[in-house]
Amino acid sequence: MNKITKKSYFSFLALYLVSSFIFLSLAAYWFFNSQVSMELNNNYYKMNHIADSVSSDIIHAAMDKTPFKLQHFDKASVALLDKNKKVIYGKLIQKVNYSKDYYMQDDIFTLFSSRPAGHLGLSYIVVQSDECIHNVEKIKNKIAYAVIITAFLIIIIAVVLSYIFLKPIKDKMQEVEEFVKDTTHELNTPITALMMSLSRLKQKQTYDLNILNNLSISTKQLHDIYETLTYISFDTKESCEELDFAKVVQEHINYVKELTTKKHLSIETDLQPCSITIAHTKAKMLISNLLGNAIKYSNQNATIEITTSSNSFTIKDYGIGIAKEQIDTIFQRFVRASKYGGGFGIGLNIVKQIVDEYNYTIEVDSQVGVGTTITISF
């Protein structure tokens, strides 16, 4: 990852984690409060149930005139008081505030009731228990463990999602970096040639046809790079017109004559009239990219064959060729089937865009070490 991708990755990761942890904290807080509320209600009903059970035993003992025995409760302490609030049975965990029916003090819940109603000389029941606090503590620990495990899973998910989310950006950034490097390389060649040719002209101070050809080739290469970059960078709108595609092909053959001569390439043509309706710039881009590739990937002293018919355009070179498994990818932007000869990896992508825009079809037939034939049917 470069600095921009890393910054984006960690920014997204931080944002995801912060928002997730805020949501997790709010959810845990709400759940804890709801569980505590339920536990408090349960505790109140349990203590009431104990008071009811003991009162029932007192009343039955009084009515049946049988001995009364106070039940033992594992998680609660029960005390039975007379009318003077003196403990007769059981014991108190802490002093009782007789002004309240139900309250908590020092983590002990106390229920004060007058259910015995004086039977057996007992007027009041006091139930005290710390079970609720222990249960709340257990709930707190369970929620804490759940939050820690969930937070751990969120971190893992965040890292994976951040990587998946930013992978297209990372790939695009890598494509842009490679594109910039390729652009620098492509610009460096004609610029260096221009500077050397101008330097030689200054030294000779005489007219030199070879130097002028080099200047012309380098200037045209820079112009072609400029047109390509302009095409992919700006949404230029141009009206369509009816033109003879064969004439546009011939114009471009003349345009690259100095380059083909320098590389000792010959171009054989069979240009029949081909009338199509297309924007002139896009017609030039079709020919420029396909012929440019044919020149770039042809060996020296090779031949390039160009044919037009009433509804098709074919260009055939005897160059390095394209592997079969790569043919399906050569129209993708920034994809290059070979590092041979440089280039941006956008020429054939532009060709495919134009072909699709006008509902043309394009066919590629290639064999490594033999050459490539490309046919566009209008």
Image (cartoon, grey):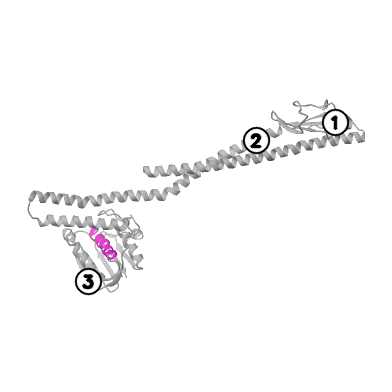
Magenta stretch: includes residue 87: no
Q: Position of residue 160 (x, y in %)?
A: 47, 46
Tell whether label 2 touches label 1 (CB within 8 Å): no
Vertical placement of residue 208 versus 154, above or below: below
Q: Position of residue 112 (x, y in %)?
A: 78, 32
Q: Look at discs 1 and 2 and give the one toward the viewer.
A: 1
Give the x, y percent position of residue 168. 41, 51
Alpha-carbon span between mark 3 and mark 2: 90 Å
Residue at 18% of width from left, 57% of height from top?
A: 217
Indicate which disc, 3 or 1, sits on the residue closer to the N terminus: 1
**Does any portion of residue 68 appear in the rendered image?**
yes
Of the two numbered discs 3 and 2 on the same chain, state the one appearing first in sequence: 2
Can residue 1 be seen in the rendering of this structure?
no
Q: Amino acid at mark 1?
A: Ser
Three-letter amino acid code at disc 2?
A: Lys
In the image, the segment drawn in magenta is: 281-297
The mark nearer the N terminus, 1 or 2, is: 1
Q: Secondary structure at mark 1?
A: loop
> The N terminus lies in which quarter of the figure?
top left
Disc 2 target residue: 138
Q: Which residue is mark 1?
A: 123
User: On screen, 345 above or below 142?
Assistant: below
Frontmost residue, 117 versus 120: 117
Query: Which dot, 3 or 1, sits closer to the camera?
Result: 1
293 vs 196, left or right, is right
The residue to which callout 3 is attached is: 270
